[in-house]
Image (cartoon, rainbow, N blue to C red):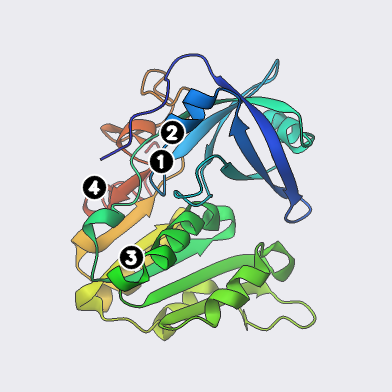
Amino acid sequence: MPHAPIDAGPPHAATVVSRVQESPTIFTLRLRLDDAAAQAAFRFAPGQFNMLYLYGVGEVPVSIMSDPEEHGIIGHTIRALGRVTRGLAALQPGDRVGVRGPFGRGWPLQDLGGNDVVLVTGGLGCAPAVSVIHYVLRRRARFGKLVIIQGVKHADDLIWRMQYEQWAKLPDTQVLVAASQGAAFWPWHVGRVTELFGLARFNPERAVAMLCGPEGMMRAAAESLLGRGLPEAHLYLSMERNMQCGVGRCGHCQFGGAFVCQNGPVFNWAEVKGLLGHRGF
């Protein structure tokens, strides 16, 4: 079930605590809500998102990538693409933004204990999955193997490279990374991320898979995982759409008969398999 948003009305003021440039176009902002009561009440599930408001410019939806147990700090990793995100990219510690949320339905981690966890992500799709990794690692005894599969177009696009290297050293954890274009001293696979699916080691009868990234990649990953015997009920996808209000009123994120901002962004495979790849949905 989705967590109740702190406020679906006007944004809460928040201060930028820190800023990290992850790549030439990707950056991470760590925020703290200015109102102590709002900050104390803020709780989110991995996979949910906030609406970030840049004063005088506009508002955009951004996945929350911080640890759910890291109370007091809210992390967002953002790619500078449009007017609002380029404006957010110019912020520095001490600057202020508006925050509404959290919104949507996250990953159903509380219901999936005892399973292996397979994460398949592409590009910046890794951001909403990072909070899942933190969640599993903090509760390691509740889950089986952790398999992390990440694909990027170019080796230089991989953010959190040190974290991937650290995760790969942990017990019962497998990290598979692919870049369509490699680079000097690139330690992982060069090629399509789909070429790694067959290398993942997990028990399909007792596993849950979570996918985020380009829809073509997610469809290929879903077909591979289902072909190995993963139950449809244990396959989840995080969908991206043009979300402008976060509360199901503007209609921009309609996805079939659902709204991604309210019924998603996380959907079970059975809910979306008939819509993927169809224009207009």
The amino acid sitting under disc 4 is Glu
Q: Which residue is mark 3?
A: 209
Please state the total of marks drawn on the protein image. 4
| Cβ–Cβ under 8 Å for marks 1 and 2 | yes
Q: Which quadrant holds residue 1?
A: top left
Label number found at residue 116: none
Q: Foreground: 196 or 117?
A: 117
Label number found at residue 271: 4
Q: Nearer the viewer, mark 4 or mark 2?
A: 2
At x 74% / y 35%, what residue is drawn?
Answer: 86
Give the SS element for disc 1: loop
Q: Earlier in the sequence, mark 2 or mark 3?
A: 2
Where does residue 49 sit, x and y in percent of width and height? 47, 38
Give the SS element for disc 3: strand
In the figure, 218 relative to 268: above or below? below
Q: How far apart are the two marked residues, 1 and 2, measured between alpha carbons? A: 6 Å
Q: Nearer the viewer, mark 3 or mark 4?
A: 3
Q: Which residue is mark 1?
A: 44
| Cβ–Cβ under 8 Å for marks 4 and 2 | no
Would residue 145 be found to the left or right of residue 124 on screen? Answer: left
Give the SS element for disc 4: helix
Residue 261 visible, this orientation: yes
Label number found at residue 102: 2
Q: How far apart are the two marked residues, 3 and 4, measured between alpha carbons? A: 15 Å
The amino acid sitting under disc 3 is Ala
The amino acid sitting under disc 2 is Pro
How crowded pointer 3 is (Cα within 10 Å; few <14, some 14-19, many 20+) is rated as many
